[in-house]
Image (tube, rainbow, N blue to C red):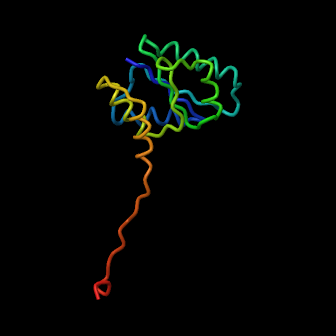
Amino acid sequence: MKGILLLSHGDMAKGMLQSSSIFFGENLPQVQALGYQMTDDSEAFEERIGKAIAELDSGDGVLVLTDLFAGTPAHKTTRYLKPGQVDVICGVNLPLFLELLGLREAGGLDLSTLMQTGKDGIRLWEVAQPQSDDDFF
């Protein structure tokens, strides 16, 4: 099973992991969340990322999900990138993460599908305006 590492600025990654428990239960195997805090040393954070990747990789690799492209959490993953073994998707949202958990349980992961799910999860909610009888004349 592919490991999953959520990375974010602040506690967003931990919040996404907690939110996923509503859908998939608590204590998901091979999933961790790390948040980069303003007081963190960036080199120590990079070491925490490396340790987490090593813990999560059972031989099937690790998919890292970060909040922002080129932010510190994403930047600190570059040392560990190995296409097909350690991949990184930047710009994670809850729909993408939940889709990943579902696909992982079903045994199939397609990065393009995951990214499309993340994009499709961003919508403008438009409420239809009530029509008056005068609109028909």
Q: Is residue 49 left or right of residue 56?
A: right
Residue located 39% across and 20% down the image = 29
Q: Residue 83: x percent and y percent?
A: 51, 20
Q: Nearer the viewer, residue 46 or 88?
A: 88
Q: Residue 44: x percent and y percent?
A: 68, 20
Residue located 69% across and 25% down the image = 42
Number of callouts in the render? Answer: 0
The quadrant holding residue 98 is: top left
Residue located 65% across and 31% down the image = 72
Q: Residue 76: x percent and y percent?
A: 64, 25
Q: Residue 117: x percent and y percent?
A: 40, 40
Farthest residue, direction top: 59
Q: Is residue 77 left or right of residue 117?
A: right
Q: Nearer the viewer, residue 30 or 27?
A: 30
For residue 48, above or below residue 129:
above
Quarter of the rendering occupied by the C terminus: bottom left
Residue located 39% across and 24% down the image = 28
For residue 134, above or below residue 129:
below
Q: Is residue 75 left or right of residue 104?
A: right
Quarter of the rendering occupied by the N terminus: top left
Q: Is residue 111 left or right of residue 108?
A: right
